[in-house]
């Protein structure tokens, strides 16, 4: 192989590395919370588009640093269903019992942010989630608004490729579920009193 | 280079271990007992409070204590966190003994701890740090072969503390700590030979020995 061909191959491989992008698919296990089920209240859950089958793509500014596409699938939706359905029964639309207490919970993803070892100049990935949760009664009167956050970090250490980033996201989602469970536990009395 | 020489160098690289110094301390505050059907669980303090105890250190400590005794049960940290989710997560777990009554005030948590006979919670803090490093090592490769030349060294300190909490009495019954310092080096004349002081694994070994002996009375 002559020198010119070698140079072209090296240049091409460098360019290919520069243009490559990461595609992360997130799937996580969130345990069922150890909380008391409130049999007297049923819940209807609604989620914004960024929670149902959300695919995160970086904005133009971030694209210059690193191109990462994160496919959350329905992981976030499953997380909220897992937590809320541990506290309340899922409302059945065919059930027309007028005495039944129903609350409507609307969940929106407000912020998803992360830092990579390159951007933070350290050896770890850090991930934040911030959700806005609106609780309404059956007549759509607002009962409460919650802000729930989740944070996760993972040192790159022994992990290969994207694994540390995926773990940081999973830890942040698990932390969101924990904070959501604690918030719901603390506010459940207020909800019960309001709809009563 | 002959095959036997390569084998000797390879063996040297694997078996040569740097020197390290271990210091173990123990402090007992109150009398305590544990029976073979009761359990303990290890939990590290949260990174939210700046604690950086490594996951692999927690795994090492769990398996090491489990192997070294059969006087009590040890519930793996992750399994315990899953069973008691969300009460012992990094952001929600009690960080000090003063936080314990709040969690144990939850009837569901208290009942499950009682059913599973989990008597002691051991809070682990600490990490492994590199204090100083020096020397220079350079490697080069050419069409005729390659090699390294130089000498590099660094000092590691692994300092960990285990605080034993009695969940039924809501008190701290004692503390155990392990402090291991060691110097690792890499001399290189053509082939680099790493001589590593395994401070973290020595700390894991020392701390697990001490926790087992703590409960053996």
Image (cartoon, helix red, strand yellow):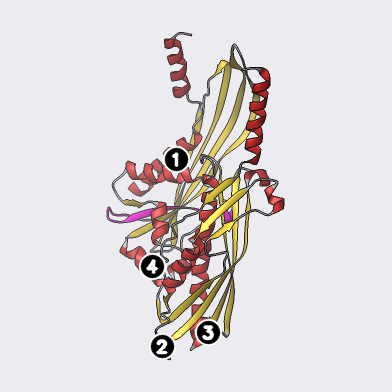
Q: Quadrant of residue B134?
A: top right
* In this picture, residue B177 sits left or right of residue A122: left
Which residue is disc 3 drawn over?
A: A137
Image mark 1: chain:
B
On the same chain, marks 2 and 4? The answer is: no
Q: Nearer the viewer, residue A51 or B111?
A: A51
B40 magenta-colored? yes
Q: CA distance from mark 3 to mark 4?
A: 33 Å
Q: Residues within 10 Å of mark 4 (few under 14, many from 20)?
A: some
Figure check: B31 above or below A48: above
**Category of crowding for the residue at label 1, using alpha-carbon neighbours closer than 10 angstroms: few (below 14), some (14–19), many (at least 20):** many
Q: Which residue is mark 2?
A: A96
- Closer to the camera in the image, A47 or B36: A47
Q: Chain of mark 4?
A: B
Q: Which residue is the extreme one toward the bottom?
A: A98
Residue depicted at x 36% and y 56%: B32
Name the residue that disc number 4 marks: B110
Q: Answer whether labels 3 and 2 touch (C-beta < 8 Å).
A: no
Which residue is denoted by mark 1 in the rendering? Answer: B204
Foreground label between 2 and 4:
2
Query: Percent x, y for residue B57?
Result: 47, 43
Q: Secondary structure at mark 4?
A: helix
Percent of width and height locating residue A143: 56, 82
């Amino acid at each position: 192989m002559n020198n010119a061909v070698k140079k072209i191959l090296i240049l091409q491989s460098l360019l290919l590395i520069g243009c490559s992008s990461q595609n992360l698919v997130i799937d996580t296990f969130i345990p069922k919370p150890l909380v008391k089920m409130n049999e007297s209240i049923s819940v209807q859950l609604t989620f914004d588009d960024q929670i149902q089958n959300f695919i995160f793509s970086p904005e133009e500014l971030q694209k210059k640093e690193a191109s990462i596409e994160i496919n959350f699938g329905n992981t976030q939706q499953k997380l909220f269903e897992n937590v809320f359905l541990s506290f309340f029964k899922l409302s059945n639309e065919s059930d027309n019992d007028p005495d039944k207490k129903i609350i409507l919970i609307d969940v929106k993803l407000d912020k998803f942010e992360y830092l990579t070892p390159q951007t933070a100049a350290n050896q770890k990935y850090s991930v934040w989630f911030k959700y806005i949760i609106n609780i309404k009664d059956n007549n759509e009167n607002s009962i409460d608004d919650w802000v729930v956050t989740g944070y996760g970090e993972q040192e790159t250490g022994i992990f290969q490729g994207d694994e540390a980033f995926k773990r940081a996201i999973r830890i942040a989602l698990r932390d969101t579920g924990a904070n959501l469970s604690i918030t719901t536990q603390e506010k459940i009395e207020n909800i019960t009193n309001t709809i009563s | 280079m002959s095959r036997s020489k390569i084998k000797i160098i390879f063996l040297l690289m694997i078996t040569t271990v740097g020197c390290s110094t271990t210091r173990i301390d123990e402090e007992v505050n109150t009398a305590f007992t544990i029976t073979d059907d009761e359990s303990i669980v290890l939990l590290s303090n949260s990174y939210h409070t700046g604690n950086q105890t490594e996951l692999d250190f927690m795994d090492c400590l769990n398996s090491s204590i489990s192997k070294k005794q059969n006087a009590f049960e040890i519930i793996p940290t992750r399994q315990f966190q899953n069973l008691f989710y969300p009460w012992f997560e990094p952001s929600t777990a009690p960080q000090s003994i003063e936080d314990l009554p709040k969690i144990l005030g939850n009837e569901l948590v208290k009942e499950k701890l009682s059913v599973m006979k989990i008597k002691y919670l051991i809070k682990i803090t600490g990490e492994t740090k590199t204090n100083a490093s020096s020397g220079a090592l350079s490697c080069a490769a050419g069409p005729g072969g390659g090699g390294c030349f130089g000498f590099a060294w660094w000092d590691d300190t692994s300092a960990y503390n285990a605080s034993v909490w009695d969940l039924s009495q809501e008190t701290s019954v004692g503390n155990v700590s392990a402090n291991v310092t060691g110097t690792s080096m890499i001399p290189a004349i053509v082939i680099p030979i790493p001589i590593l002081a395994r401070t973290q694994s020595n700390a894991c070994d020392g701390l697990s020995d001490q926790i087992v002996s703590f409960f053996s009375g």
